[in-house]
Image (tube, helix red, strand yellow):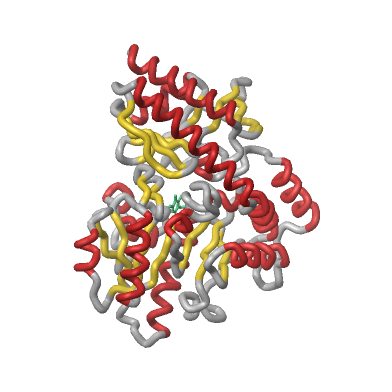
Amino acid sequence: MIPTLLPTYARAPMSFVKGEGSWLVEADGRRFLDLGAGIAVNALGHAHPALVAALTEQAGALWHTSNLYQIPKQQELADKLTELTFADTVFFTNSGTEACELAVKMARKYWYEKGQPEKTDILTFSGSFHGRSSAGIAAAGSEKMTKGFGPLLPGFVHLEFGDHDALTAVITETTGAILIEPVQGEGGMRPVPDQCLKGLRDLCDERGLLLIFDEVQCGVGRTGKLFAHEWAGISPDIMMVAKGIGGGFPIGAVLASEEAASGMTLGTHGSTYGGNPLGCAVGCAVLDHVADPAFLDGVNRKAGLLRQKLEGLVAAHPDVFEGVRGSGLMLGLKCKAANVDIVQAGYAQQILTVPAADNVIRLLPPLTIEDSEIAEAVERLEAAARQLSAA
Ligand SMILES: *Cc1c(COP(=O)(O)O)cnc(C)c1O
């Protein structure tokens, strides 16, 4: 008999009932150090007082009105985001993959309105992840995500990650945009080098293409800048955001320049819930914390500390680990043992990590993690590695 929950997830056998900062409390009382943060979502940890206050205050006043009316909190969050980024305009969604849907629609509509409706193709890269909607899986294109779900949305051209020659060769008069994660998350914590992001920007400028960044996982302070592409000193035309922006409340966004957004006129897109007062109240509170330069300095300092300790861990356990990769507090341990076994061994040590492709385990702690918790985390990973070596 089919379980009453559709069996699409391989869930670990823990049921958490409470969260406090970097910790999750299991129903049986055990405390787990959370280095997954709900897959880079709980940017300010669990039950951050400012987020609890923002949500409960809004919950007591008004939950939902739809986009038939003005939503002051939505306007406030859009103003903050445009103030802090390259973007001139924002559309709010409820998730990352809905942001992907709009990014694709926006790029195609842009060329349509420019009188070049043939420019529908979007270049994407192996190992990428853009969510599980029909556009998201077609964009990523991996067999694992797309098999059996055809016919897929056409118009995506898939390239090998890092293959510069293929990239320039494949651009034709039907190419409209390039879509890329500045740091691949699901694909195994693979940063795109700054000079390559710059190169992509130059290429898009030369060939007249839109550059779309998917910062759903690497954005909102995760790499030590508010958005990861800032390290390269360039900007996209369109950017997808979700995960961290809601700190655990479901909200996503598409940010765009005025030019790139110019096709999205009255009536061309919509969402019942998108930009709902609850999500936007929380989003404003998250941004107020994360966009503070002192907060981002702290992320960079903590990232250095964690990375240094992880290098030590890898050196001490060359039979289990191969290396450290990633950016900021978006770090990956490339494994020699099976990544899922290490994640599993971590559960016994009451530490939570997340597997990724390429036999990597992801470390995505709350950006608020304390130094003592970083030390504790690496001790627990060390214990997990010892346990695996002994087995
Ligand atoms: C998680 C993720 C998505 C999809 O977000 P959902 O909220 O799960 O739909 C898209 N892109 C990237 C880079 C992600 O990490």
Number of marks in the rendered image: 0
Quick check: can you spot residue 1? no
The x, y position of residue 311, in whole percent, is: 39, 29
Query: Camera-side residue: 132 or 306?
Result: 306
- Picture quarter containing residue 122? bottom left
The residue shown at (55%, 45%) is 41
Up/down of 241 relative to 297, above or below? below
The residue shown at (43%, 39%) is 331
Quick check: can you spot residue 30? yes
Q: Is residue 51 left or right of residue 189?
A: right
Up/down of 325 relative to 109, above or below? above
The x, y position of residue 4, in whole percent, is: 50, 39
Quadrant position of the C terminus in the picture: top left
The x, y position of residue 294, in whole percent, is: 63, 47
The x, y position of residue 380, in whole percent, is: 48, 21
- Picture quarter containing residue 212? bottom left
